[in-house]
Image: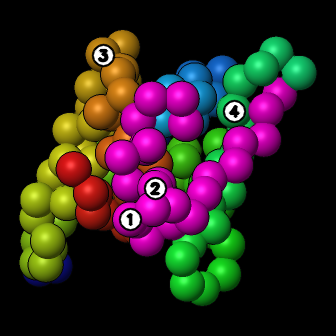
Amino acid sequence: MDDDIKIKIEFAVSRERLEHILTTAFESGIGYWVDPSEGDFKSCEATRSAEGFVTALTFQPTKGPLASVTVNTLADAIGRALTAGLREGQEDRIGHYDAMMAATRELRDEQDAFTADALVQYALFGKVVYG
């Protein structure tokens, strides 16, 4: 429609907070779907900062090339997740809704292993696939 008004929302997320999300996901959030015995991914390796926080996750799938999530791709995914539930025509509303709720909880300081896992999945797959 020509008379629609577009709203752009900008917000800042600290690098430390993004690293904390990746650290939580690596240490307690993603283990159930990164399982060499029965999953789509053989392994996940973490790159850590000097302070010990995870700055990137590199996934080795059972088939195909390596995939990674960095603080930058995570930040992009959070932005996309916050608006995912607002767009019309989403084929998989549940996967997008889970990511949107995880991003909202994260920004309200309610982060846990679930939200970290959902946001890493959204950064990696474009929706929440597992869990």
* Kind of residue at disc 3: Glu
Q: Nearer the viewer, residue 79 or 9?
A: 79
Badge 3 is on which residue? 110
Question: Does 44 appear above or below 87?
Answer: above
Task: Check if mark 1's residue and mark 3's residue have beta carbons within 8 Å.
Answer: no
* Kind of residue at disc 4: Val
Magenta stretch in the rendered image: 26-49
Q: Nearer the viewer, residue 14 or 66?
A: 66
Task: Check if mark 2's residue and mark 3's residue have beta carbons within 8 Å.
Answer: no
Q: Residues within 10 Å of mark 2 (few under 14, many from 20)?
A: some
Q: Residues within 10 Å of mark 1 (few under 14, many from 20)?
A: few
Instruction: Report the residue that reaches farthest toward the front.
Output: 37
Badge 4 is on which residue? 54
Secondary structure of the residue carrying numbered label 4: strand
Residue 74 in view of the camera: yes
Mark 2 or 3: the one toward you: 2
